[in-house]
Amino acid sequence: MMSGGTVEDRVSHEGALPIRDVVKIARDAAQGLVYAEKKGIVHRDIKPDNLMLNGEGTVKISDLGLARDASTEVGQEGEEGIFGTPHFIAPEQALGKPVDSRTDIYSLGASLYRLVTGETPFKGASVGEIIRQQIHDEPRDPREIREECPADLADLIAVMMAKDPAERFENAEALAAAIGALSETGRLEGAGGGLGKKLAFAAIGLVVIGAGAFFAFGGKNDPVRPDPDPPKTTENETDPEADAAARAKREAEQRELEVTSRFLAAREFGLGLAGAGRLEDPDALDELAAKYEHAVEAGPDTEKATEARAEAAALREKAKALRQAAADAEAAAEAERRRIETAWTELQAEVTRLEGESRFAAAIAAAIAREETLKGTEREAERQQLLTEIPLRAEAHAREEEADALRDVSAGGFDAARERVDALIAAYSEGLGEGIAFEGIRKLIGAARQRRVEIDELESAKRRADLADDRRAVFAFLRDHYEKLRGPFDLAERDAAIGRVEKELKTDRYRDRIAELRANLDPLRRLRTALAARVADPDAKRLTVSTSAKILPRGNLVEADGNGVTIEDRRGKRETARWSQVPIEEAVRYLFGRMDRSPAESLDLATVCLEAGLVEAAQESLEALDEDGLGELESRAAQLRAEVAREAQARAKLDEIRSLYAAAKGGDSAAWFPLRREVQDFFENFRDTRALVGASDGSRYFPER
């Protein structure tokens, strides 16, 4: 049905595709993702192999074997391993985190990268290396690989392949719209520059509410001033009583007039205070009261004085009340200031203490808890600033801890590094809330947990590398050791060589094997001691070295010690041969093999022969044992028989392999198949034999090869 094959088929045969074809494929694939998104599907394996072409050249998305329903949180919890294709997998999918349509957008971006450049975004010697790059590294700019790649198309791919899903296109429709804006040349239609990175803008509206104040002041109507002209008396009238009464009346009228005048002046002054908005000013009220009191002084017994006196008393009382209210308000304000300053000081001290204990989330929680206390005060802005600064200090602290952990790792202190990171996670998690204020701390905890995983991975890698180094060192030493045991060798030098390789080992895995090599030299020492005792014993059988010996002198053995043996020929001439000059094979055949031996010495001889590769001699020494007389040596004898038999089997297997190889090289093509099986069986079943060490160059000795 898809006669055009896959897009990968085209890239594999043609290399990088023409830009117009890349744009066409991108449009079709994006429409496919739009459709999948509408159906609630996350594909999870978008790659060129799954982009297929029909007869008209239209691209369809195939293979929904890894697809999941996007209506639930799509992730890999409960699934074993990482699902997806390493060269095209999104970072969050590689980490096993929840995925959505933006994951498919990343994989499509990686696929377009391959179509444009002919290469995958990342390369590596292993799947793990490629996935590590997907998570941590940025790919090369496509234009560095293919110069004619348009900047707009390169920027589109960069947005699609952003490490953080939030920095990619938010959905498939947004991607399809962006691709739709590209011409078939890969350039943005109607624009001179590149597509660029996505930007998000937020708008903030400010509402200003104002308030007005209205003040109205009303007073009594001004009284009509009395006629200033006193009534005139008739000329030449001289009634004294009438004159006195008239004067008294005039004086009373004058006082009333003066009081009224001063009252009106006070009222006018009050109107001025009202206009100036000073009627709540105690000092102004006192000044106004003084003016009313001044009116009273002009005529205390007048009717208007009574009114002025009442006005003055009311004003004095109001001024007193205002002063008391102001004093109370000031006291309350001072108490509030002290309360706020105390709360702020306590908050600062608590934050300092919590930060000193690396409990940054708890410090944020403490600042949030003071919100109501400091809200609307001059310290509120500083509290908000504190909420901004704490995550920054936490980030700086996390960087320092990470650097210290890295130094621990560099020094091999993986446990110390883990303890440091675990302590950081525990401290940062204390008091962690759900709000946006804790977002920075949550990210730091996530990063710390990733560092924890990386420390484990680094330790595993170090352990694997150390194990591989030990493997190589032990194999090289075994080859040299067994080679030296087949010829003349210095026992002390072998001891020293074993000690050196033992010190070089980085792991404990091969220490037992090295210790076994050292232990297997002890039987040779015991045999030399036993030989010296036999030679010194006048009743013991004399040992004679025959003429078939190649290194040892011919004649009777007359002396033996830890340095060598002395042999006397028929003419009485003596010649000394040092042990470091005598091959094990000759020592076994002409010296140890001919002396009378106890069962323990026969077992020692078998061990020496096995170690030197003299399998047949080892078998002969074991066959000479009396099964009934072994006693506590029985288990050692059984173990030696098993080892010798295994070496014999390994040598027989080698002979069979060499025979098959000769036949295959000689033209018998059918011999290659059993040869392969026999070689595989040899490495699986005879890995720890001396025969394998002697026959291998080491290239198949290591599992990683």
Image (cartoon, grey):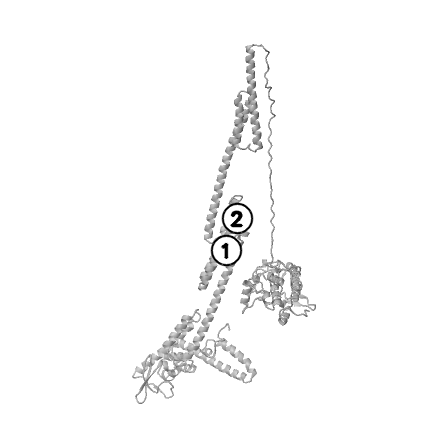
Return the residue nearer the eye: 320 or 182: 182
Query: At 30% from the left edge and 89% from the top edge, which residue is drawn?
Result: 571
> Which labelled disc corresponds to residue 106?
none
Going from N to C along the chain, the mark reached first, 2 or 1, is 2
Q: Residue at horizontal 47%, vertical 65%?
A: 459
The reply to whether residue 104 is in sight is no
Q: Residue furthest left?
A: 538
Query: With 127 as the anchor, is 582 left or right in this view?
Result: left
Q: Position of residue 682 (x, y in %)?
A: 50, 78
Residue 468 to residue 314: above or below: below
From the top left corner, tell me how far across and down residue 166 is, in percent: 59, 57
In which quarter of the view is residue 483 placed?
Answer: bottom left
Numbered disc 2: secondary structure: helix
Image check: 317 left or right of 107?
left
Residue ID for mark 1 = 395
Distance in Å between CA atoms under marks 2 and 1 = 18 Å
Viewer can see residue 465: yes
User: Is 379 located above or below residue 302 in the figure?
Assistant: below
Measuring 51% from the left and 59% from the top, which residue is drawn there?
449
As displayed, is residue 546 above or below residue 424? below
In this orientation, which residue lies closer to the viewer: 8 or 688? 8
Task: Name the amino acid type tagged 1.
Answer: Glu
Element assignment for label 1: helix
* Label placed on residue 384: 2
